[in-house]
Image (cartoon, rainbow, N blue to C red):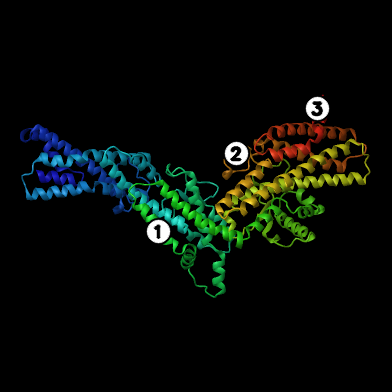
Amino acid sequence: MIHDILFTLFSSNADLPIENFTIPEVASSFLHPGEIKILEDLIRIANQYKELKKFIHQYGTQSAGLIKPKQLKPTEEPLLQGLYLQAFADGLDLAVKPYRDLIVQLEANYLKRPNLSLIFIYHQVNQYQSLFGFLLRLVSGVVTQRIHGCALLQYLQQHCLRGNDKHYQAVRLIQNSVYAIFIKQLFGWLLHGKFVDQFGEFFIQHVENPRSSGSPLGRGTVGAAQISGNSFSDNTSINTELWRYEIRREILPYYFPASWAEKVLFIGQTVLMLISDPRDGTEKRLAGERNYSNEMRFTSMKESLWGEQEYEFFKKFHRLQLDENMNVAKFEHIVDEIKLCVSEQMSEIAIKEADLLKQLKLIKDYFMLGRGELFSELLKQTKSLRTLFAKGITDGSSRDLNRAFQLAANSVNITEDIEQFSFVLPPKDDVDSFCYETKGILSYITLKYKVKWPLHLLFSPKTLEKYNEMFRFLLRVRKIQYDIHQVWSFQRENRIQKKSELLQFRNKLMFLIDNLQYYLQVDVLESQFSILMGSIWETKDFEKIQRAHTVFQANVLSLCFLLSNNSPDLSSTAVLHINENPVLTILDTVLVIVDKFCSFCGSCKDPMTTVERQEFDGYEQAFNKLVDSLLKLLIGLKAGPSSAPLSQLLLRLDFNYWFSNNTQSNVS
């Protein structure tokens, strides 16, 4: 019977032979009630071990993640496959290994001494009853909560601190097994820009759509191989692929701060950018070495990126894996060390080789209308542009607009770097532009910029979208300014009397638009750009440059009223709906009134007819109300953190309180 008991305790089969000994009719005749109780406890321990072994067989390395259907209950749904779950099962197998070794030793002792008592077997095995109960609860939590991927690290950490030393050691064994997978993926991403993640378990994921953090691709190794497989000269593919990596915060362990995860993402993206150097392919083509495989090319770039440092980093990650106690500070330290290395290298390449300062000046010149003479000349293409802006978007609209852009550049002798910019007019259904009430091509213009390697990290697709919102708003203000000045020329040529109401109202509109334009270009763009240039000169850390650029763009969007003033996170700024910024709402309506007034002046008679007088009075009354509301809003906003530029705007618009007094007299 003792041998049957040992076999039952070791076996994971469904049938337990010693259960027959506990049948009341049999047990009462041959066994003492105390022995029956011992047998029942042993059966309980055997059942616990059997349940644990069932889980290990289903999800451990031996099954390679494949679940046998006959092992599942009809209502039981298998867990998502994954390396972390497999490591969890393998760690669980290590945790129960001392129990198996004990049973083997007891069997050896029994063969030597057949007179071993039942109470001795029970005394040796009973110590695992509490451990098995704890491990079953641990497994039950994984199954019921459907825990997947990196979330297992957090789950294990929550159950790590136990008063029972055996429970603690068991969890530590499982943690070490799971952390081995995590550290390998982390090492691959930080040093090579790739990681094996077939089942979407890592907290950094490659997603289909970079706008959303939805389901991952989950197809083998993702990272450098995908970029290296593309043409290195294709900047569009690099920029698109690079920003498809996002952080899945729902599976990031809570003890790793979000700032640490952002650093990890930044390092991997930087490595991806550095190993996608287009110069490498060009040099090899010039040398006639056309047969380099992607793997050989990747290896050579990797060696040039890390050199002897790679082995040092490997040893540090290996020590992390061997540590008995997980230390978050060590993870943060090694990530900071790698970030400093790649950031300085990226900063040097960006500033010296990619000429970052020049590219930022180009951004200011084109997206922010810094080359005012170019866009003034563009707007002077009166015959073509007025027709172009008035009609809807057609197949030839982009071609006509780029042709006008080239003619304007030639007129003002701008030929350098003009090829990096071009206009695109996407279908209206694909554009969500909300800054304009008037409909036309100006509402949908997109300025395309050919990003120079390796500045894709700085000018992401989302960043360029924000620049385009700024560009559309500034171009609209510039066009309205041009139109109101054309009205001035028209009225001067027609010798309209200085005391004419039409002329006086035009002067008010021109005064407001001119000062708004000066505020946008000088008080906002020039001053903020100077701050950005100063920040770049003071640092060699590319991450700090990236952060300074993000702050610059957020400040410009905010001061141009394209961004909510209470945005808590500058790193995740997004252009908001016009209704969320009352200043932009008022400015939009003012620009609409000015646009309609310019068209009105072209057809207005002198003197005005009754109908024209009513239309003119409507413009004037609406304008006075809007200016009054605008001034009140600016007075309230100038007490905020961006008070200096807004105070300048308020001073220029309401110099000597002319608008305020005029509005109050009209109301009274």
Query: What residue appears at the point 68 percent right and 50 percent down from the top-left corner?
Result: 530
Q: Earlier in the sequence, mark 2 or mark 3?
A: 2
Separation of marks 1 and 2 at Cα, in angstroms? 41 Å
- Along the horizontal axis of the image, is 114 left or right of 637? left
- Amino acid type, mark 1: Phe
Question: Which numbered disc, 1 or 2, marks the residue closer to the eye?
Answer: 1
| Residue position for label 2 | 567
- Along the horizontal axis of the image, is 559 left or right of 488? left
Q: Quadrant of residue 603?
A: top right
User: Which image quarter is the N terminus in?
Assistant: top left
- Residue 32 placement (x, y as % from top left): 7, 33
| Residue position for label 3 | 664
- Residue 600 placement (x, y as % from top left): 84, 40
User: Could you tell me how many numbered marks the image carries?
Assistant: 3
| Residue position for label 1 | 314
Q: Are marks 1 and 2 in contact (CB under 8 Å)?
A: no
Q: Quadrant of residue 2?
A: top left
